[in-house]
Image: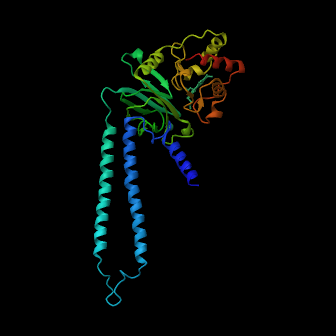
Amino acid sequence: MIRTVAIVLAALALCACSGFQTMLDPAGDQARDIDVVWKTMLVVCGVMYVLVLGFLAWALWRARGAGRLAPDPITGETPADPQLRRSLTGWTALIAAGLVVLTTVSFLVDRSLAEAGPGPLKIKVTGNQWWWLIEYEGDLPSENVLTANELHLPAGRPAVIELRANDVIHSFWVPNLSGKEDLIPGRINYIAVTPRRIGDFRGQCAEFCGLQHAKMAFDVRVDTQKDFEAWMRRQTTSAANPTDARAVTGKQVFNSKACVMCHRIQGTDAGGTTGPDLTHLKSRRHIAAGTLPNDRGSLQAWIADPQGIKPGTKMPRVPLSADELNAVVAYLETLK
Ligand SMILES: [Cu+2]
């Protein structure tokens, strides 16, 4: 029996304390600082809670002896209790000390969250209903990178992310790396992130932003500096021309339908900015902001009926024949 309980508790602790979308498993400086505040609060409040319950039990126990502190039946006065006075003074001091600890820790952590380290990587993230535009500023304009729904960061280097919104208020939150920061139309906010652990994480919009708010997630990849640079270099290249016959047809279909008005594919006539950049679509893990895995079946389902998968999404259903749909997907699959 005790063993079963122990196993269940251990399983609960494990599944709550590690993972790619949890603040209990910090993988960056800011998340680690926030974790310090959380643990301090847990300890201080936990100790207080146990003490309060302990004193309550003790008071009930004492009251059992009946009438020790009962008013004098003749004068109606309660006898002074020096022990009680001393305990109350001690108790007040303890509360004050607890509050001082909490205030100090949260003040210090708040300060440290406000400053990024030296030489930060600069990234712009723009919230749209319901996807994330992500831009990296290179040293030269030709080294700028435009992508969507997948944030890449080098481990160990501070990054400052500039946050904007195109329509309504969204909120940027990657629990493993840092706190939350709102994206507000007409305003620029910043959030600093210094990832320390290589791995895949997940971010989520944390401010209700309409119908598909829950399907406004993004992937985060923390790489070594070298892998990050290789990724950046690939992202700056134009889309290769398809060679496969079906993909060639797919490109023609894409460019002759409404797709071209909303999506950009670098190196082609497609230059729309209403939807995500598709130049390196297949290098991403998910489509439609974390909604579906990035495979052939999902791409077909999405393009055939975006409104069925994400009702209200700003991508309309573009009528395509089955052949056209297959061809377009074959083309999209060449966009590595
Ligand atoms: Cu949102």
Query: For the view shown, which residue lies furthest in the right direction?
Result: 322
Residue under the image location 52 percent in, 22 percent down: 277
> In the rendered view, would you say 164 is above or below 226?
below
> In the rendered view, would you say 102 is above or below 273?
below
Residue 202, percent from left and from top: 50, 34
Residue 276, percent from left and from top: 53, 25
> In the rendered view, would you say 157 is above or below 109?
above
Quadrant where the C terminus sits is: top right
Could you say which is closer to the camera, residue 263 or residue 37? Answer: 37
Residue under the image location 31 percent in, 26 percent down: 119
The quadrant holding residue 295 is: top right
Colour scheme shown:
rainbow
Quadrant where the N terminus sits is: bottom right
Q: How many marks?
A: 0
Residue 166, percent from left and from top: 47, 32
Residue 125, percent from left and from top: 44, 30
Could you say which is closer to the camera, residue 30 or residue 269? Answer: 30
Could you say which is closer to the camera, residue 80 or residue 121? Answer: 80
